[in-house]
Image: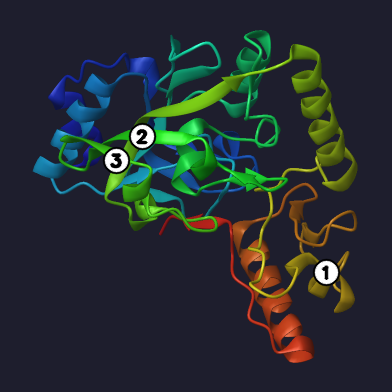
Amino acid sequence: MELNKIIKEANLEIPEERILFNESMKEYTSFKIGGPAECLIKIQTKEELKEVLILANKNNIPITVVGNGSNVLVLDEGIPGITLMIKIEGINFYTLDDKKFKVKVGAGEKIAKVGRMFLNNSLTGFEEISAIPGTFGGAVRMNAGAHGKEMKDIVKSITCMDYIGNEKVFTNSEMKFEYRRSVLKEGKYIVTEVEIELQKGNTQEIKAKMDEYAKFRKEKQPLEYPSAGSTFKRGKDFITSKLIDEAGLKGYSVGDAEVSTKHAGFVINKGNATAKDVLELIDKVKEEVYKKFQKKIELEVEIIGK
């Protein structure tokens, strides 16, 4: 049975306007690249997520989770099956003592919005991360970080759902956090809520730090063009962007995909780049860096689709 028919006959408790068929992923990724999702569903509650996962499991429909689409490259052929955008929101504060606060954050909350909420409540410990694009769920999954701080430094527990609809809670240690990695990268669980712990701080000092990190990002990164953020991971004993720069690859392009002249660690979309363009460019960068420095560089961006 066709996917369209399976989903329509299931009478999901999700409004029709949040279930889209043959939807171009260009509109849903920060790279502005990607073919159509066979079915794109915007999930706003745990109950909706469970309902879709049970349906998909029963009918052997593949599930892909894209979060806010800020760290992914969707292939030109698109995404088969059901693509989920997790938009579960909610920010709840709990007082632990005079100085410590616990905060529960929905996986679909955008990091920038949460950062502003913490500033408004004079909570410190999140400033370094506050300028990162994307959602809380995606940031935890890849242990996102900046300026010496990572999600692992503030996370207490993570509530997830497996692909048959069962809920599970992970502690910080059970997440097996590493550089740009956690146990969730194995693709067996979907984040629904994150619990973190922060300290009471000085509002002016928090704002000054957030402004400083936002300014750094604006000055150093090519925010004027669509991209998926930092394309490559940092090496264990080298700075990847430095090697790309020294290999003379700044400004190198394939079609409309280009190694940014502002920051060599970013591949940008100058207008109408395709996933094929980006992949060819990535292969060229890897090849040239290895040829010149004998260093293998790894992708930070996740490739999704057929």
Task: Check disc 3: other Cα within 10 Å, few if <14, some if 14-19, many if 20+.
Answer: some
Where's the N terminus, which quadrant? Answer: top left
Task: Tell me the element at label 1.
Answer: helix
Identify residue type, mark 2: Ser
Q: Nearer the viewer, residue 178 or 53?
A: 178
For the residues labelled 3 and 2, say whether their Cβ atoms are less than 8 Å apart: yes
Q: Which residue is mark 3?
A: 170
Q: CA distance from mark 1 to mark 3?
A: 36 Å
Q: Earlier in the sequence, mark 3 or mark 2?
A: 2
- The answer to whether residue 18 is seen in the rendering is yes
Q: Which residue is mark 1?
A: 242
Q: Earlier in the sequence, mark 2 or mark 1?
A: 2
Where's the C terminus, which quadrant? Answer: bottom left
Q: Earlier in the sequence, mark 1 or mark 3?
A: 3
Residue at the location (85% across, 40% down)?
216
Task: Check disc 1: other Cα within 10 Å, few if <14, some if 14-19, many if 20+.
Answer: few
Residue 7 sits in quarter: top left
Identify residue type, mark 1: Lys
Residue 266 x %, y %: 75, 56
Q: Which residue is mark 2?
A: 157
